Image (cartoon, grey):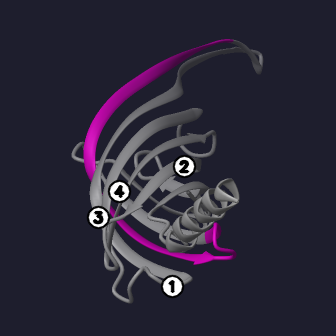
Amino acid sequence: MKTKLIISLLVIFFSAQLFGQENVRKVDVRLGAGLSLLGTGDMRTFNYENELNIKLNKYFSSSISINLGRSNRGVFETSSFTQGNLNIFISPFKNTGRLDFRIGTGLTYYNISDAYISSQYWVNRVLINNSCKFDNRNSFGYNVVIESSFLITDRFLVGVKAFTQPYINGDINSGAMLKLGIAL
């Protein structure tokens, strides 16, 4: 009898903990993919993003993300970049419901590599030789982000993001992406 009472109390105690934590998800992970225009050379790039978000309160949240981008459409033969972002967001309509519209800004750092043909040697309309050059550069910048996400279920979300990222060296990266996420 005593064992049944202890087991019943433990079940009630742990159940109360579970129900008390319902809808308190403050952390989510988002994966995004989209297109951007990399301003140096007007390269149309495909971007992939991994992002970790933390809700600070009902109006503010922060995120850290890593982006990868690649392009072979534009002035260069190919361009690719790796980027890290640290952002803070404000949700003017609160981030407590299913829909979260937010505006943010933050810091960004990226490394970009461009490859282009520097010279070609032709004989009788036949390409005999070409030389390629590679440029690699790094720069700091800032982000301006407008994002909206919608919780499909209590854990899964879908969203869209528009962004622009001016860099100190004169580069700029602007675009949009679709995001899928899971609340942890």
49 relative to 134, above or below = below
Other residues around mark 1 within 10 Å, as few (<14) / some (14–19) / many (≥20) = few
In the rendered structure, which amino acid carries the disc numbered 3?
A: Thr
Pointer 1 and pointer 2: residues touching (CB < 8 Å)? no
- For marks 3 and 1, give the one nearer the viewer: 1
Disc 3 or 2, which lies upstream in sequence?
2
Whole-angstrom CA distance, mark 4 to mark 2, is 14 Å
Residue pointed to by mark 1: 97
**Quadrant that contains the N terminus:** bottom right
The residue at the point 55 percent across, 71 percent down is 16
Whole-angstrom CA distance, mark 1 to mark 4, is 29 Å
Other residues around mark 3 within 10 Å, as few (<14) / some (14–19) / many (≥20) = many
Disc 3 or 1, which lies upstream in sequence?
1
> What stretch of residues is rendered in magenta?
129-158
Residue pointed to by mark 3: 105
Other residues around mark 2 within 10 Å, as few (<14) / some (14–19) / many (≥20) = some
Pointer 3 and pointer 2: residues touching (CB < 8 Å)? no
Residue 95: x and y in percent read 42, 79
Other residues around mark 4 within 10 Å, as few (<14) / some (14–19) / many (≥20) = many
160 relative to 115, above or below = below
Counting every numbered tag in the picture gives: 4
Pointer 4 and pointer 2: residues touching (CB < 8 Å)? no
Whole-angstrom CA distance, mark 4 to mark 3, is 10 Å
In the rendered structure, which amino acid carries the disc numbered 2?
A: Glu
- For marks 1 and 2, give the one nearer the viewer: 1
Disc 4 or 2, which lies upstream in sequence?
2
Would residue 173 appear left or right of 148 to someone viewing this image? left
Give the secondary structure at mark 3.
strand
Disc 1 or 2, which lies upstream in sequence?
2
In the rendered structure, which amino acid carries the disc numbered 4?
A: Gln
Give the secondary structure at mark 4.
strand
Give the secondary structure at mark 2.
strand
